[in-house]
Image: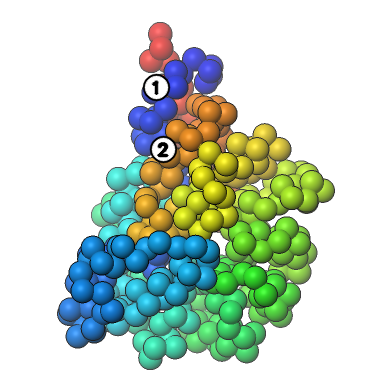
Amino acid sequence: MNLESIPRRELPSLLSRMPKAELHIHIEGSLEPELIFEMAQRNGIKLDYASIEELRAAYAFTDLQSFLDIYYAGAGVLKTEEDFFDMAWSYLNRAKADNVLHAEIFFDPQTHTSRGVSFATVIGGLDRAVRRGREELGVSASLILCFLRHLSEEEAFATLEEALPYRDRFIGVGLDSGERGNPPEKFARVFARCRELGLHLVAHAGEEGPADYIRDALDILKAERIDHGVRCLEAPDLAARLARERVPLTVCPLSNVKLAVFHELCDHNLGRLLKAGIAATVNSDDPAYFGGYLNDNYAATFAALPELGAREAYHLARNSFEACFVSEETKKGWVTALDEFFAGACGDRG
Ligand code: ADE
Ligand code: ZN
């Protein structure tokens, strides 16, 4: 396959049409302002904003915490199983439009159980959407339960207990929310228990927090993938290890710019991560808040970074499939579909 034969002007169409997986999407971060207003109305909740435009105008973040404050407030409109279904169903339809074959979706149960919404309500709605997505859209999806790291270890254990009756409806656990001051070691025992239970393990690390948190997520939590992880290049030994051990990073370029991890997209280190041999992937994080879904992330990042071309597009999509928590056989099928897609794109050159 001569990927270099594909001209740059064809990249936007190639990026949008190529099959891909999304591995870092917070379902509460897919809640669009229109849906927030609709749910507030049907649930009799008064919002702090008079209109959709006013709410959108508040999406001007200076760092992770300034985003999280608005994001948790937005999630406050979710009350019923129908609300959780509608949110996830809306995301899965967007994913389908972006040629996403498989999504591993984060959800934050503590954001809801702390408001009196039961775990059963949350997982009931999300799981119903995931099943319907498989059947009606042909999009494969699974759920990953995230513990909020600003809360205590005890609260994480209590959430795990609540979740266990629904063990068959989620495939793993993650760690999100404010990173600074909440190191991986705070959740060492919860993650050890989840590991014993056979759950997959991932963790946000090296987004705002230091490279050391990435190392600790691997060594202490035994994380199989690192969410964000972009600060790994500050520690060359760690970057070399990530490359050697093929630890996937779920990178979210538009999020990184909105939360001031990088000043502008042209400063982003995605190209350098790939050059260092790291299994980076592209993801949307919280698409309703950061200006776009998965294809918007691919398009904007490739437009901003001249070092990214068709070869990198292929490797990013391939990395996304190889990093999925599915059988080797399923991965192989998706990689074959990707190879066929790119062979077709090269073949079209004649
Ligand atoms: N929760 C939702 N989005 C997040 C992010 N980018 N980092 C940490 N926690 C989050
Ligand atoms: Zn995230």
Q: Is residue 32 above or below residue 236?
A: below
- Judging by the rendered image, the residue that carries numbered circle 1 is 9
Residue at 40% x, 61% y: name it: 60
Separation (CA) of disc 2 from disc 1? 12 Å
Q: Where is residue 93 in the image (x, y as percent from the top left)?
A: 28, 54
Q: Position of residue 45 (x, y in %)?
A: 24, 84
Marks 1 and 2: in contact by CB < 8 Å?
no
Give the secondary structure at mark 1. helix
* Quarter that holds the C terminus: top left
Q: Which amino acid does label 2 sit on?
A: Ala
Of residues 136 and 261, the one drawn nearer to the viewer in this rendering: 261
Query: In the current view of this chain or complex, which residue is farthest to the top?
Result: 350
The crowd level at tag 2 (other Cα within 10 Å; few <14, some 14-19, many 20+) is some
Give the secondary structure at mark 2. helix
Mark 2 vs mark 1: which is more N-terminal?
1
The crowd level at tag 1 (other Cα within 10 Å; few <14, some 14-19, many 20+) is few
Residue at 48% x, 35% y: name it: 304
- Judging by the rendered image, the residue that carries numbered circle 2 is 299
- What kind of colouring is applied to the model shown? rainbow
Q: Tell me the number on the disc at residue 336.
A: none
Left or right of 2 in this view: 137:
left
